[in-house]
Amino acid sequence: MTPTGPPSVQEPEDFRRLSIVATTGQSPSAVLDALLSANLAVVESTPETIKLDVSAFRDAARAALSATPTPEWETSFAAMLDYAQHRGWYQPDTGTVAAHIEWTDTTR
C-alpha cells in the first residue's frame, strides 16, 4: 500500500507468505482504515491484528492474476489457508485470516 493508492494484491501466485506491505510513514490505523474501506479487512481487526475477509481477499487475488485462475491456483490458495488454519491464523467459522503489516521504504 502507498499513502495515495488503494490496497491491492501484488503477488497473487505467492502462497508462501501473506503480509500487508505498507510504506514507512503511514500509521497502522491508516493502513487498517484503507483495508476496511476496500472491504478487505473485517471490523474486528485492530492495527496490531488485521483480519482479512478471505472471500474478499480471494476475489482480489483472482482479479490480480494475469489470466483466469487455474484449478492449480485454487488448490494452492486452499492449501495456504489450510496451513494458516493449523497455525491458528485462519478461522473458517468467521472466514478471516490474520495478516501482519510489513513496513518498507518502497512499494513493490
Image (cartoon, rainbow, N blue to C red):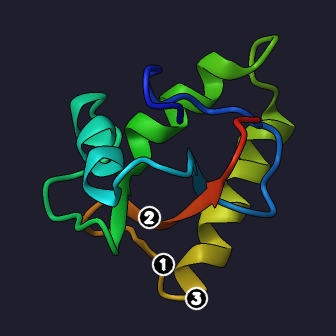
Furthest-front residue in this view: 25
The kind of residue on which mark 3 rests is Arg
Q: Position of residue 85 (x, y in %)?
A: 53, 79
Q: Quadrant of residue 80?
A: bottom right
Q: Residue at x 62, y 33 (%)?
A: 9
Q: Is residue 72 left or right of residue 36?
A: right
Relative depth, front residue between 95 and 39: 39
Circle 2 crowding by C-alpha within 10 Å: few under 14, some 14–19, many from 20? many
Query: Callout 1, which amino acid?
Result: Trp
* Dots 2, 1 in contact, CB < 8 A: yes
From the image, tell me which residue sits under label 3.
87
Q: Earlier in the sequence, mark 2 or mark 1?
A: 1
Q: Which residue is mark 1?
A: 89
x%, y% of residue 10?
70, 32
Q: Which residue is mark 2?
A: 97
Give coordinates of residue 18: x percent, y percent.
64, 59
Q: Is 9 placed left or right of 59 in the picture?
A: right
Q: Residues within 10 Å of mark 3 (few under 14, many from 20)?
A: few
